Amino acid sequence: MSVFGHTLPKSERLSGRSAIGELLREGRYITSGCLKVCFKAGSADATRIMVSVPKKLFKRAVKRNAVKRRVRESYRTQKSLLGRPVDILFIYNNAEVLPSEVIFKAVGDALKHISEK
């Protein structure tokens, strides 16, 4: 683990058809700025996340990957706002690539809302 604890190891990434399906079926949805967020109490030891950027919004993979990178970076630096393990799916729902500061604020607001629930 890094000195600052701002890492995103494989164990904190949500993967697997059954885990994702369970999250989509049983999770609660909120909207935070440019993001739609689905979350549910985690069954694992750590919080796990997944980021989705629809191909319908960005045809070019370069833009989709840039947005995913910004969302993951925003989560990684603010994940200390969560107090308990949660499974989270961030879905980007804006037709343009927003600046990192806007995405950072949207992720922070979503994490604060999740930690209160």
Image (cartoon, rainbow, N blue to C red):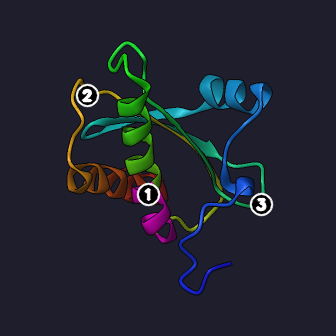
The residue depicted at 71 percent of the width and 60 percent of the height is 46
The residue depicted at 72 percent of the width and 54 percent of the height is 10
Q: Residue furthest bottom?
A: 3
Q: Quadrant of residue 74?
A: bottom left
The answer to which of marks 1 and 3 sits earlier in the sequence is 3
Question: What mark, if any, has residue 45 been given in the picture?
Answer: 3
CA distance separating discs 1 and 3? 21 Å
Q: Is residue 31 left or right of residue 20?
A: left
Front tag of 2 and 3: 2
- In the rendered structure, which amino acid carries the disc numbered 3? Asp
Classed neighbour count for the residue bearing mark 2: other residues with Cα under 10 Å, few (<14), some (14–19), many (≥20):
some
* Circles 2 and 3: CB atoms closer than 8 Å: no
- In the rendered structure, which amino acid carries the disc numbered 2? Asn
The residue depicted at 42 percent of the width and 17 percent of the height is 55
Front tag of 1 and 3: 1
Q: Position of residue 92 (x, y in %)?
A: 37, 32
Q: Is residue 103 magenta?
A: no
CA distance separating discs 2 and 1? 18 Å
Q: Which secondary structure is most common in the magenta stretch?
A: helix
CA distance separating discs 2 and 3? 32 Å
Q: Residue furthest top?
A: 56
* Circles 1 and 3: CB atoms closer than 8 Å: no
Question: What mark, if any, has residue 73 been given in the picture?
Answer: 1
Q: Position of residue 38 (x, y in %)?
A: 50, 35
Q: Which range of residues does the magenta coloring cover?
A: 73-80
